[in-house]
Amino acid sequence: MHSLAVAEQDAPRATRRVVRDSEYPWGNTTMMNLYSGTTDPFSHRCRIVLFEKGMDFQVIDVDLFNKPEDIAVINPYNRVPVLVDRDLVLYESNIINEYIDERFPHPQLMPPDPIMRARARQLLHTFELELFSHIDVLEKNPKGADKERAHVRDQLTQLAPMFTKQKFLLGDEFSMLDVAIAPLLWRLDHYGIELPRSAAPLMKYAERIFSRQGFIDAMTPSEKVMRR
């Protein structure tokens, strides 16, 4: 499978500041800034990519229950994540992550081959429809989300057999597909989703992701306590 992982050697330490939204000087765009919900799985995706890349950036923590008015100004849907890179403003996690991957291509997270890249995008779209479309219900109405839990459980269980033959979703290299699904796998306990024993290969795969330094560094304190 096509994916590149270029190790950094003697790279300078990146600037990775995290500030509260109340402390942030809104309008400052001298550095790549990610407006990120501290418990939001879509923001989590973007943080993972930023930390995997190791470039200079700043994460601005946004209180999802008390968003600053500036979020609605820069994103008409008034949602996070939002990436501001000088004059460019992007929202929607997959769009943000592909932009970061193309601008900072090492390590490359999307396949370089056009056919494989198209297949990866198709799978990302499938994840949105079959898995992440249920996140709102799981977040906002957990007591009434049994149907959504069962659907996500069954979809994830179907993925398990592939991990008896490969380390990651696109083969032996970590890719954008692994980034996309990782926040959900981390939140299974939080959402009350219990996988069957047959999903053991999937959970071993999840542990490989969770042990990555980029994943560890990307987590907020609120996310660290989501998993038992």
Image (spheres, grey):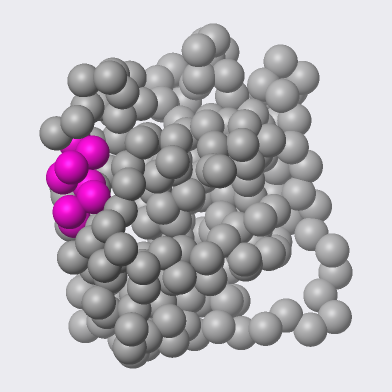
Q: Which residue appears farthest toward the front when viewing the image?
A: 197
Q: Main secondary structure of the magenta part?
A: helix
Q: Residue at x 68, y 35 (%)?
A: 221
Instruction: Give percent across and percent down for residue 163.
Output: 34, 78
Question: 120 or 161: nearer the eye?
Answer: 161
Question: 205 or 73: nearer the eye?
Answer: 205
Q: Residue at x 54, y 10 (%)?
A: 66
For residue 107, say whether it is visible.
Answer: yes
In this picture, residue 45 sits left or right of residue 141:
right
Q: Please state the extent of the stretch shown in magenta in the rendering.
A: 148-155
In this picture, residue 39 sits left or right of residue 148:
right
In this picture, residue 48 sits left or right of residue 135:
right
Q: Residue at x 16, y 45 (%)?
A: 151
Say which quadrant the C terminus sits in.
Answer: top right
Decide: is 200 above or below 224. below
Say which quadrant the N terminus sits in.
Answer: bottom left
Q: Residue at x 59, y 24 (%)?
A: 62
Instruction: Give percent across and percent down for residue 94.
Output: 36, 52
Instruction: Give percent across and percent down for residue 201.
Output: 36, 73
Is residue 150 shown in magenta? yes
